[in-house]
Image (spheres, rainbow, N blue to C red):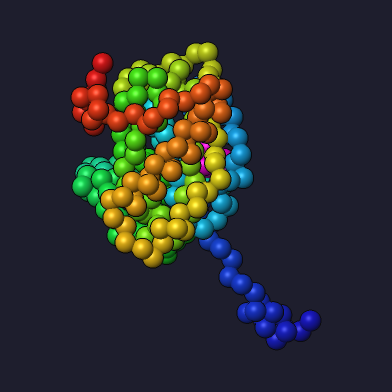
Amino acid sequence: MGTAGAAESRQGRAPKRRSEKTPFFRIVAGIVIPPMAAIVKLELIDGHNLPKSGAVVVSPNHINELDPVLIGYAMWKLGRPPHFLAKASLFAIPVLGWALRKIGQVPVERSGSVRGNDPLTASRKLSDEGLAVVVYPEGSLTRQPDLWPMRGKFGAVRLAIDNGLPLVPVAHWGDHKVMQPYGKKISLFPRKTVQIKFGAPIDLSAYAGRPLDSAALTAATTSVMLAITALLADLRDEPPPERLWDPAEHNQTETGHFD
């Protein structure tokens, strides 16, 4: 093939998709993952349910403060760098804020999507860059005494429905042996096994193009929480509670430590 033909062939090719694993993200992963791998053995189940490319909302259960690191580690192993909806105040901290921006984390106000409204910044990143964004539907660590998922908030489903994105439920179990809920101390030895199971994307198409009132958002969110609970029941090999835990029914605050 001549030079002109080769040039024409190159022009006809689809542009190569830019890797989500940017150089700076690789540096951060190189710092975070080795110590995690030393104390935790990840067992990934049904990882094929996480789309290999394109925007997606990932919704896990929430047991302790180590969860985001382990979910991020799992997603990285599956080829998808994690992007979290982080408190906007963190981005004002020198160095940390710069690093969060460099790896594409999404700043949201405390009154933003985690409380029910769709953050414009997250929507733009998802649609324009095709990122995998982690949204914890419970909004905080579970208050359920036996660490089952509790009732969820609207943020995850609102983000998925408004932008026509798949929502992948995820459950993990075993990390409570690495760090107790509401604790700060990490158990280093012996090395713990943490299972992370990815569910099939939840079909939320029935809610597209219709008014998202409280009843619709509650129904969609409940379907997500029940899917997460079913995944966790498989990991724990035991039946879940009959109802999702509601902190308000048990005189519990939504955030903060409690006994």
> How many labels sit on residues?
0
Q: Residue at x 35, y 24 (%)?
A: 144
Q: Nearer the viewer, residue 223 or 191?
A: 223
Answer above or below: position of 62 versus 83: above
Residue at 41%, 54% (x, y): give it. 160
Q: Position of residue 152 (x, y in %)?
A: 34, 39
Relative vertical location of residue 39 with respect to residue 2 in this rendering, above or below:
above
Range of magenta residues: 74-78
Answer yes or no: is residue 77 visible.
Answer: yes
Residue 204 belongs to magenta span:
no
Percent x, y of residue 32: 45, 34
In the rendered image, which quarter contains the N terminus? Answer: bottom right
Residue 15 in the image: x percent, y percent?
58, 70
Which residue occupies 53% across, 21% down?
A: 238
Q: Name the foreground residue: 227 vs 125.
A: 227
Q: Is residue 19 above or below residue 255?
A: below
State the image quarter where residue 191 is shown.
Answer: top right
Of residues 209 and 111, the one drawn nearer to the viewer in this rendering? 209
Q: Quadrant of the C terminus?
A: top left
In the rendered image, residue 76 lying in the magenta stretch gets the answer yes
The answer to whether residue 217 is left or right of residue 256 is right
- Outermost residue on the bottom side: it is 4
Kindly identify the residue that appears in the image at 34 percent across and 52 percent down: 216
Q: Is residue 212 left or right of residue 80?
A: left
Q: Magenta region's main secondary structure?
A: helix
